[in-house]
């Protein structure tokens, strides 16, 4: 080898030794450059808004400043690392900048046009299609993050092994996460109600039902089936009584928004308890708390009105804590609490009971839970059938009926004898995004469990979500994900605790990032949409316009009967008999002019409705977009 090459090799080796001595290496220098570019992207994304409109986005970039930020950040990281010899500075800078860029990408992915269109209900199809594209975009972002995290985890470049977090600190963090989630999501979800953009289905039903419970003790409503009936004739949900004392205190539908946000967020305490019982470190406990609170469907689902399903996640997680703790009495208490949510909640308990019997080998306890679930399911279905007029909603499984037999037996026959048909129905193209929304946030960890019996936990996704023909069952924007979310989370936990150190760190860190990114992609546009709706209504009808509209609705006597626009029905929660105006004008004509009042929302076409009213009513009040008419 020529002398010059030998000398160069020696000098490079000495230089490399110096760099290593100063906690620098070629890898870290490259990582610093990537992190520097990430900082520049952060600046551009914060200032330019959505990047999807790339022509406008490109025209706003200040190129000199972009490169100045990159160079300054690069030099700063190298200098600080060189002089302090702290080898974790660049890796942490890379991780945090990558996460920040990923979150900003997720927040700015939807265009303002889509947000505006869906805010006023003019293009719901655009919102559905956007949600499908969101999940694949998030996965694309996750692929890039995965490469970064995999490099960071190798050789523990983040120094995670040296970090210690006391469990008391993780409890404090759990409290903070609970309070912030309850306040933030309670507020932003209530904006839709305050701007008169909630409707009878499904919020008005529960607003009227809770007021009737406070008055009579019975969950009555006229909105659900256009006549006075118990909500238990549609769904048997005695759990509603558990939260009635809170309604007595606040006596407002807005209480329901904060209630469901708080109940959903309260699962973080169950996660803390479970982590402690499993002997997990403070670091792992914190990570699981973050995965839970940012799990995409969880707080995202609170934006769709109010539903009993949203109590499922927290109850199931507490049930698992008592199962793991082997506390039989409390296991049975929370089993009953789970069953009280809804008649089909028995499916979750049946699966959990099978898990206890097969995975945990606790046959007696599992058998007791199984019997309880089956007996309750039969009782609950009979209650619904006897109280209501339509029985249990079997129509959502109509794709599995044989010879017109609308029974569970018919469904079981189809599933058992035609498995190919079951697979065909479950794995349609439109249902794949839902599967991605549910499993990608935890990196499909449930399928990595060493014991295949752990997969029992995810079985309810078949009958509850992807088997059904009701499209909303497999949509993360609705309420049908809360039970399976808890089971997927627990299946992921049972898998993660079996992983070796590096694999566990990789999966957990990536799960935190994916949950944060995917949750942002779902939630941020809805926050913008609700704020936009509120601001639009607030500016359209003056400084006190919304308050005047609320006062007009409140002026209708509680013992009167009123026919109202669907958008106004939730604000008539105090009225005993409320009927909604929808698009079936023939049924409205059949009713005749037998209600004391009409309350119309003029944001919608009221021409035919006025012809139905005829000359029997006089206007007695007007506020904002509302007009109140009283029968002569």
Image: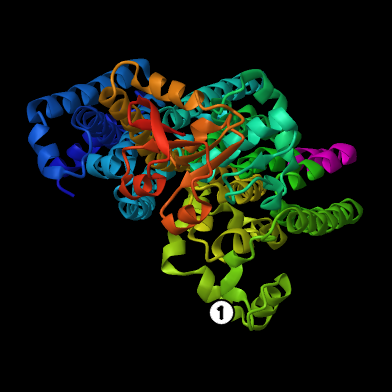
* 415 shown above or below 313: below
Residue 298 seen: no
Q: Give how far across and how far down residue 104 sits, in percent.
A: 31, 34
- Characterize the magenta stretch by its predominant secondary structure: helix
Residue 344 percent across, percent down from the top left: 70, 55
Q: Quadrant of residue 606?
A: top left
Identify which residue, 497 or 207, lies in the foreground.
Answer: 207
Q: Residue at (10%, 43%) from the top-left corner?
A: 55
Residue nearest the observer in this picture, 384 or 623:
623
Which residue is at a point 46% across and 63% down the rendered structure image?
431
Q: Is residue 604 visible?
A: yes
Nearest the viewer among 578 and 334 is 578
Provide the residue designation for mark 1. 421
Membership of 331 in magenta stretch: yes
> Is residue 458 part of the magenta span, yes or no?
no
Residue pictured at 41% horizontal, 42% vertical: 522
Q: Eyeballing the image, is 391 above or below 307? A: below
**What is the x, y in percent for residue 213?**
70, 33
Task: Give the side of residue 542 with respect to residue 6, left or right.
Answer: right
Residue 7 in which image quadrant: top left
Q: Which residues are magenta?
A: 319-334
In the image, residue 520 above or below residue 80? below
């Amino acid at each position: 080898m020529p002398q010059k090459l030998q000398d160069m090799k020696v000098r490079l080796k000495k230089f490399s030794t110096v760099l290593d001595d100063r906690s620098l290496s070629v890898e870290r220098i490259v990582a610093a450059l990537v992190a520097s570019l990430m900082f520049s992207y952060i600046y551009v994304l914060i200032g330019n808004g959505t990047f999807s409109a790339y022509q406008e986005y490109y025209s706003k970039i200040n190129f000199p400043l972009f490169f100045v930020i990159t160079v300054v950040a690069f030099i700063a990281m190298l200098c600080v690392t060189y002089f302090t010899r702290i080898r974790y500075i660049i890796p942490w800078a890379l991780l945090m900048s990558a996460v920040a860029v990923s979150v900003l990408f997720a927040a700015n992915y939807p265009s303002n046009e889509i947000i505006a269109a869906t805010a006023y209900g003019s293009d719901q199809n655009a919102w559905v299609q956007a949600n499908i594209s969101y999940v694949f975009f998030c996965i694309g972002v996750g692929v890039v993050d995965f490469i970064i995290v995999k490099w960071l985890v190798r050789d523990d470049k983040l120094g995670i092994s040296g970090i210690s977090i006391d469990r008391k600190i993780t409890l404090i963090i759990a409290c903070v996460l609970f309070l912030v989630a309850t306040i933030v999501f309670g507020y932003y979800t209530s904006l839709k109600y305050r701007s008169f953009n909630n409707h009878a289905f499904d919020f008005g039903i529960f607003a009227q039902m809770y007021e009737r419970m406070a008055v009579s003790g019975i969950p009555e409503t006229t909105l659900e089936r256009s006549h006075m009936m118990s909500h238990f004739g549609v769904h048997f949900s005695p759990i509603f009584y558990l939260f009635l004392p809170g309604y007595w205190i606040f006596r407002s539908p807005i209480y329901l928004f904060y209630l469901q946000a708080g109940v959903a967020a309260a699962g973080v305490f169950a996660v803390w308890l479970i982590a402690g019982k499993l002997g997990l470190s403070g670091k792992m406990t914190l990570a699981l708390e973050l995965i839970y609170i940012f799990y995409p469907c969880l707080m995202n689902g609170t934006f769709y009105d109010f539903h009993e399903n949203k109590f499922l996640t927290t109850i199931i997680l507490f049930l698992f804590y008592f199962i793991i703790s082997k506390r039989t009495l409390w296991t049975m208490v929370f089993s009953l609490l789970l069953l009280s949510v809804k008649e089909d909640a028995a499916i979750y308990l049946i699966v959990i009971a099978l898990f206890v019997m097969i995975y945990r080998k606790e046959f007696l306890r599992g058998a007791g839970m199984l019997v309880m679930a089956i007996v309750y399911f039969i009782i609950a279905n009979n209650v619904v059938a006897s109280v209501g007029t339509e029985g249990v909603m079997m129509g959502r499984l109509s794709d599995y009926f044989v010879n017109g037999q609308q029974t569970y037996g018919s469904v079981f026959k189809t599933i058992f004898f035609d498995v190919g048909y079951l697979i065909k129905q479950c794995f349609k193209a439109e249902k794949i995004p839902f599967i991605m929304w549910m499993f990608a946030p935890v990196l499909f960890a449930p399928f990595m469990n060493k014991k295949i019996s752990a997969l029992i936990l995810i079985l309810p996704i078949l009958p509850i979500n992807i088997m059904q023909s009701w499209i909303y069952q497999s949509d993360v924007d609705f309420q049908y994900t809360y039970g399976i979310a808890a089971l997927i989370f627990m299946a992921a936990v049972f898998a993660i605790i079996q992983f070796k150190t590096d694999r566990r760190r990789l999966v957990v860190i990536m799960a935190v990032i994916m949950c944060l990114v995917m949750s942002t992609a779902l939630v941020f546009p809805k926050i913008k949409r609700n704020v936009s709706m509120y601001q639009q209504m607030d500016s359209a009808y003056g400084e006190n316009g919304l308050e005047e509209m609320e006062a007009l609705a409140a002026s209708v006597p509680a013992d009167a009967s009123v026919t109202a626009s669907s958008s106004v029905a939730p604000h008539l929660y105090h009225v005993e008999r409320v009927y909604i105006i929808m698009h079936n004008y023939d049924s409205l004509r059949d009713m005749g002019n037998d209600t004391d009042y009409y309350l119309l929302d003029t944001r919608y076409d009221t021409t035919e409705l006025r012809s139905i009213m005829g000359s029997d009513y006089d206007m007695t009040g007007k506020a904002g977009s509302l007009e109140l008419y009283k029968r002569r």
